Image (cartoon, rainbow, N blue to C red):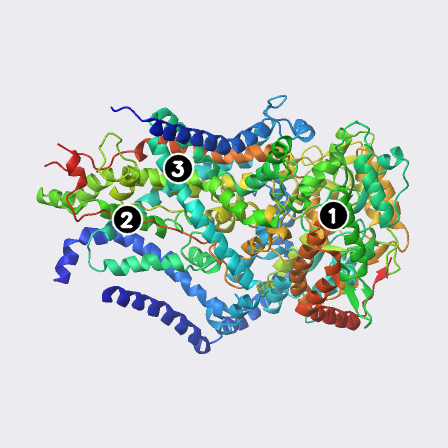
Amino acid sequence: MYRKSLGEKTFDGSIILLLVLTSLLMLFPFYYMIVISFSSYDDYLRHGVVLWPKQWVLDAYRSIFESRAFVRSIGSTVFVTVAGTLVDLIMTSSMAYALSRDIPGRKFFNMMVVFTFLFGGGMIPTYLIVKSTGLIDTYWALIIPGCISAFNLIIIRQFFRGIPNELNDAALIDGASEVKIFVLIVLPLSKPVLAAFSLFYAVGHWNTFFDAILYLNDSTKWTLQVVLRQLVILGNVSDTLHQSPEARMAQLDQQTPPETIGMAAVLVATIPILLLYPFLQKHFAKGVMLGSIKG
Amino acid sequence: MKKKNASLLLMLSLSLGVTACSANKEEAQPTSSSGSTSTAPAASSAGATASSSADPIAKKLDISLFEGVWSAIPDPNGAGVQAINEKFNVNFKANLVPFDQGGQKMAVLMASGDMPDFVGLGGADPSYLKWAKQGAFLPLNDYIDKYPVLKLIPKTAWDSVTVDGNIYAIPRFFTTKYRNVPIIRKDWLDKLNLQMPTTYEELLNVAKAFTFDDPDGNGKDDTYGFVMANGLDNEMAMGSGFYSDTWSMKNDKGQYLPGIITDASKQRIQFLRDAFKAGVVPKDWPVLTYKDNRTTFYGGKAGIYYDGTPGNKGLFDQLFKAAPSAVVETIPPFKAPDGSQALPGLSGWYQMYSLNGKLKNDPDKVDRILSMINYFATFIPPEQQNENNPDFDWKNGGVGKGYTMENGIANFPEESLSQRPKSYLEIAEWAPSDEALQVEKKATNPIQKAYAEKAVKLWSTPGMTYINPVFSIHSDLYDTKFWELNTKLIDEQTKMIVGNSSMDNWDKMVQDFLKNGGQDVIDEVNKKMQEAGAEPTYR
Amino acid sequence: MYIAKVWKYRFLYLLLLPGLIYFIVYKYLPMFGLVIAFKDYSAFQGFTNSPWVGLRHFRTIFDSPDMVRIFFNTLYLNALQLLFAFPAGIVMALMLNEVKNSFFKKTVQSIVYLPHFVSWIVVVSIALTALGSEGILNGVLETLGFQPINFLTSPHWFMPLITLEGMWKETGWGTIIFFGSAVRDQSKPVRSGRHRWCEPLAEHPIHYASVSARDDCHSAHSAGGTCARYGHRTNPAHGELADQRSRDDLGPIRVPERDRGRGLQLRYRVRLVQEPDRSGPDPRRQSLG
């Protein structure tokens, strides 16, 4: 271990300073949300945003957790997230692996995938296909139509290609079949990438909102985000170009839920998925191929 | 490299080829749909006569509804829907979604042919007109006389939803009066010894006093004259003549003009500009929203804002907590350049139900749906809105279960939302007049009660309500092009208010508007108004 | 022969099959719906019977007078993003890599990815509190004796502000990807002549995706039906760029919810792809015994 020069020390020091400042900057809004969600509505109205609320109360959280619609939606969301992520990973990694090897027709299939990057069918045609494959009003409508993201597929495919051919050749010489190679060698080596994409897919499923409203007619099946979104501060409405004065009055007449509940809803909606990252983190930072090639 | 190009080309040509093919196929397709329905009516009418001679209610029907709703969404298996099923002998499936997503999902449902038995729509907007012309909805002209409530609906409302002579929707009631108009803290006026303003000059002085003279007496410099938000929310129009959507002033060709480009608006924008300069309104207002403003005004920190009658209960409760001695009053309208001194009225209806065009082969269903709508829309006078009226009691799920009575006023708690049948078919009752609603009786806290009583009295003054002729016509250009141009105008006016642009640009702004299609809009609207014989009226 | 190769790789084709079916059914079949861009579509006549109108709808879009300005605004915004937002994630990941203390590193990592989950609506209200004319930052500036700056209402600040907000939101999230594939063991000696920050970039295939505004627009759309930078959206002082965000609806073509933002506006994905250098001897072999 050699001594660091002064230059190096300053460099390190300023990096640490920068990181600390950035962390504080990014942490601040969460603190803001936490403070508001634990304040009573009266306090919030009177004092607005404070650093430390007069009283920490659970009112906002109580009204969320006591709602039956909310409790039901947890079940749907957890199912869709878990099952969805599994399906996504299996589908994406298997296709990615197949396309990473030099099989005939590879170029054509790759083109097919890339092409979907540029063009999409649109909401109505997709709805019609989902309808004709019988998925309307089932949870599978939230899982299957988006199970492979072309973007993710390409990245994972590239990762698989990065695994040196020597590995595969060595395994083939040892008598392993293609099946064994995929399952026993390639997949374990791909833990960081799979972990990363399971996170991305999971976040996507967790945040399902509009698709739930579109494909699920039965509102008892709705996901967390749908239920909670009704509690969050909404901006101006309007899909239409112009809101008639009557519509405006109807909108204004609504008792808007207190901001305290809104913040609590945002936190409840995001914290569970936030916690996923630390669990997956240990898979991320692994030196991938150290030691796998000997001699 | 060649291989790559080849496969790319192959794919592109495949996709284009199929696209082209499906386009050309249209001539080859026989119109099979008309073929199949020609046999069906014969069968079902025979069946219908058979069942109607028996007992039409006896058959349990599946009825589906789709609607985007403002209120909270009830449980699809709630007691309210069970009650509906029992009473009308139906299997009622109400697919209710939040209002924001309603429009999008509706578009998808309509485009994919999945329209339920009936749908709730926002109004006679371009989508409605398009779908009506495509034959998606059932014409209802022949049914109006058969149901008491439908007979009560005024002709103007029916006219608004008529397309090519056919009525395709049932409008739902809304008040003509009681629109959101400016309100003021009367107690602040009194404290500062000021009179209720009657001109924009006086208004500016009042606003300044509200900001700088500590009207709430708490020793802090924390009040605003008034609050505004993005999009010119709270445009401070003191009377119908000043509103941007009023059509009452004429140009020298004798055409009515939209309020936003008239001198009345110019006067108003000048006032807003002066007010901004004087600091009586938050400097950040272009990025604020109406929610921020409500918090400010009802938190007791601003002197002027707007509300309807009787006003938002939750907000008035907030005000009561923040400033128990507050007194809120409607600002009586100023005299406007068009000679009027009135408050702006509404069209008298909002939202509507349309029935699926395919139901023309199912008169039983049509009858059942219309009966349901009729029942829910029948007016229950305020003095009967309690447990003694069986309809009121049933509609709201039974006293003690779906609602509670407190001091003679019915209270509808959020928890029992799914107990109330009304939550599934939230149709406003057709009242014989706005006064019959007795809205002032709905107010509970003293500030709101005093405000509502005075407001109702003001609105009831003869000639006080301006009826906009535009309510009686359909103009495609007005529905679409005008509002695109309107956005531009609002942007320009915002710039003038904050000082990024000079008031001298007003004429140029108007000219640009006219040039870019505004004159076409004016021409079409005026033509339609003449055809319909519509003129500004004051009730 | 071709057939022999296909047989040899038969398992791989099996792996490929489900994905292929998925793409055909859920991606390619709906594309035929694109045909409605050329038609006056009506559900009651169906896809094949609706009258063909050729390029009429396209003309309507491009006829809008604001088109040119919106287009250039989009380009400008994209350029800003490329210059600043894209490198930010890489820089941050490299900075984190420098840190020896693994507790500090893990903590910071866990903090910086949080903003990704904050919905845009909350971001805007925070921006208001922090940067508003009566907000925190201006308060600090005033106490220090400076003039308050109109961050939110001045037209010059709009583009930089959007870029900065985007960076705040997505930099940390971006480091996850980068970290996933590029972190290396610190104890290995570096090849001479190169700064050690070049190693991670060179050794592994890196696919760094900068923020897709699709994500932003997705959460924003879901939240309110409009692209919720509404604070800036309809602020005329900032121009009408963000106005177009909510007009994802190109006439009869409906862009799917999760793909919003793919229109003319912020559609940008940047990938930095570096295949490992297979020409020389395996660098890893050098460091092993």
> Residue B490: image x %, image y %?
69, 56
In the image, residue B375 above or below residue B536: above
Picture coordinates of residue A273, whole percent (x, y): 44, 35
Disc number lying in front (1 or 3): 3
Q: Which mark is residue C50?
A: none
For the N terminus of chain B, the quadrant is bottom left
Mark 2 is on which residue type?
Gln
Q: CA distance from mark 1 to mark 3?
A: 45 Å
Q: What is the residue that sits farthest to the front in this orientation?
A: A6
Q: Disc 3 versus disc 2: distance between alpha carbons?
A: 19 Å
Type of amino acid under label 1: Asn
Q: Would you say the residues marked 1 and 3 are in contact, meaning their CB atoms lie under 8 Å apart?
A: no
Taking the spot 38% from the left edge, 56% from the top edge, the residue there is A117
The residue beneath circle 3 is C92
Label 3: element kind? helix
Counting labels gives 3
Q: Residue at x 35, y 42 (%)?
A: A197
Query: Which quarter of the figure has residue C267?
Result: bottom left
Q: Give the left or right position of residue B277, taking residue B192 as reference.
A: left
Is C176 on the left or on the right of A251, as rendered? left
Question: Whole-Å distance between the Cαs marked 2 and 1?
Answer: 56 Å
Residue kind at label 3, given as amino acid type: Met
The residue positioned 44% from the left and 73% from the top of the image is B23
Chain letter behind tag 3: C
The answer to whether one can see residue A292 in this image is: no
Q: Which residue is mark 1?
A: B234
Label 1: which secondary element: loop
Residue C31 appearing in the image: yes
Give the residue at mark 2. Answer: C274
Regarding mark 2 in the picture, which secondary structure is present there?
Answer: loop
